[in-house]
Amino acid sequence: MNRGIMVIGVEIALLASACGKKPEAAKAEFSQAAIDAALADPGRTTDRDGDARRKPGSLIALAGVGAGDKVLDLIPGNGYWTRIFSKTVGPTGRVYAIWPQNSPPATSAG
C-alpha cells in the first residue's frame, strides 16, 4: 500500500513538473550535471541507500526537470524527492511539497 502511494506521488510530481514547463526560449537547458550534483549533495547521505531502487537520476532526466522549473511533490513522505527536486531546480525554481488533509502521515521508511 505505501509503495503504491509513493509511486503515485512520484508520477504526479513528474507530471506536474512537465505541466509547469516554461516556453523553450525562456527555459534553461536540461543539465545532467545539475542532477548529478543534486544526487551527490552531502545533505542526502541517508537517502543514498534508496537511490539504486528508486533511480532518481533517470526519472528526473525523463521528466526533463531543470533549473527554474516548478515541481509539485504530492505526499512528499520523508522528503526524499523534495530534496532532489530542490537541488535540481535551483534558486530560481520552486518545489511545492503538498500533504492533502486526508493523507496518512509519513513513516520513517517513506
Image: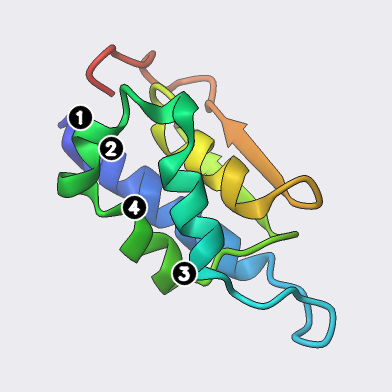
Q: Nearer the viewer, mark 1 or mark 3?
A: 3
Q: Which mark is residue 63?
A: 3
In-image side of 99 versus 103 (left or right): right
Tag in front: 2 or 3: 3
Question: In the picture provided, is 65 more to the left or to the right than 24?
Answer: left
Is 57 located above or below residue 39 in the figure?
Answer: below
Q: CA distance from mark 3 to mark 4?
A: 11 Å
Query: Which residue corresponds to mark 4?
Result: 56
For label 2, the residue is: 5
Identify which amino acid the numbered label 1 is placed on. Asn
Mark 1 vs 3, N-terminal side: 1
Front one among 23 and 57: 57
Report the Cα–Cα distance between label 4 and label 1.
18 Å
Disc ID at residue 12: none
Answer left or right for 7 relative to 19: left
Mark whose residue sits in front, 3 or 4: 4
Q: Residues within 10 Å of mark 1 (few under 14, many from 20)?
A: few
For the residues bearing labels 1 and 3, Cβ distance under 8 angstroms: no
* Residues at marks 4 and 2, CA–CA distance in whole angstroms: 17 Å
Q: Position of residue 85 (x, y in %)?
A: 54, 46
| Disc 2 and disc 1 in contact, CB within 8 angstroms | yes
Q: How many marks?
A: 4
Packing grade of label 3 (10 A; few <14, some 14-19, many >=20) is some
Which structural element holds mark 3? helix
Q: Are marks 2 and 3 in contact (CB under 8 Å)?
A: no
Going by the numbered disc 2, the residue's amino acid type is Ile
Circle number at residue 2: 1
Task: Locate residue 44, reporting x and y percent.
Answer: 41, 29
> Is 37 situated above or below 19?
above
Q: Nearer the viewer, mark 4 or mark 2?
A: 4
Residue at (39%, 44%) from the top-left corner?
A: 9
Identify the image quadrant of the C terminus: top left
